[in-house]
Amino acid sequence: MIIASHNWLSPIYERLKDELIQNKVLHADETPYQILNRTDGKPATSQARVWLFRTIKNAGYPIAYYHVDLTRERAVATTILEGFQGYLHCDGYSGYKNLPSIDLVGHLPFTK
């Protein structure tokens, strides 16, 4: 079931990401959660992240794109937002700062 889901749903997931970054305004946030048996050797008390990137409510094709990762490193946001040019509404997490072609909005103090 897992292999079949991966094989059939991965292309849809990637297409959603491609469509997401074509928008001019996105929202982003990440939420901590715990994994009992981590693949990176860290203890179960370590926090992993669910990343959410979504279009505005009135977008022509609204998309909510979730990404699960073991880390909150800037590289995750950089990879997902590669190719995005526009406004990113997010909290004050420093990992979003100074991403190329992205203007941060929403939380003060942001400086570019």
Image (cartoon, helix red, strand yellow):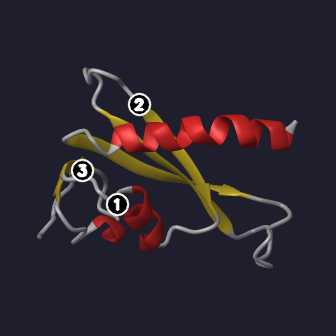
In screen coordinates, is 79 left or right of 58? right
Check disc 2 and report the residue beneath it. 63
Q: Position of residue 21 (x, y in %)?
A: 32, 45
State how far apart marks 3 and 1 are (Cα): 13 Å
Give the residue drawn at x 30%, y 24%: 57
Quarter of the rendering containing residue 92: bottom left
| First in sequence: mark 3 vs mark 2 | 2
3 vs 2, front mark: 2
Dot 1 lies on which element?
A: loop
Mark 3 belongs to which amino acid? Leu
Check disc 1 and report the residue beneath it. 82
Check disc 3 and report the residue beneath it. 88
Callout 3 touching callout 1 (CB < 8 Å): no
> How many neighbours does mark 3 have within 10 angstroms: few (below 14), some (14-19), or many (20 or more)?
many
- Give the camera-side residue of 12 and 56: 12
Q: Position of residue 17 (x, y in %)?
A: 44, 44
The C terminus, quarter of image? bottom left
On screen, residue 94 above or below 54: below
| First in sequence: mark 3 vs mark 1 | 1
Callout 1 touching callout 2 (CB < 8 Å): no
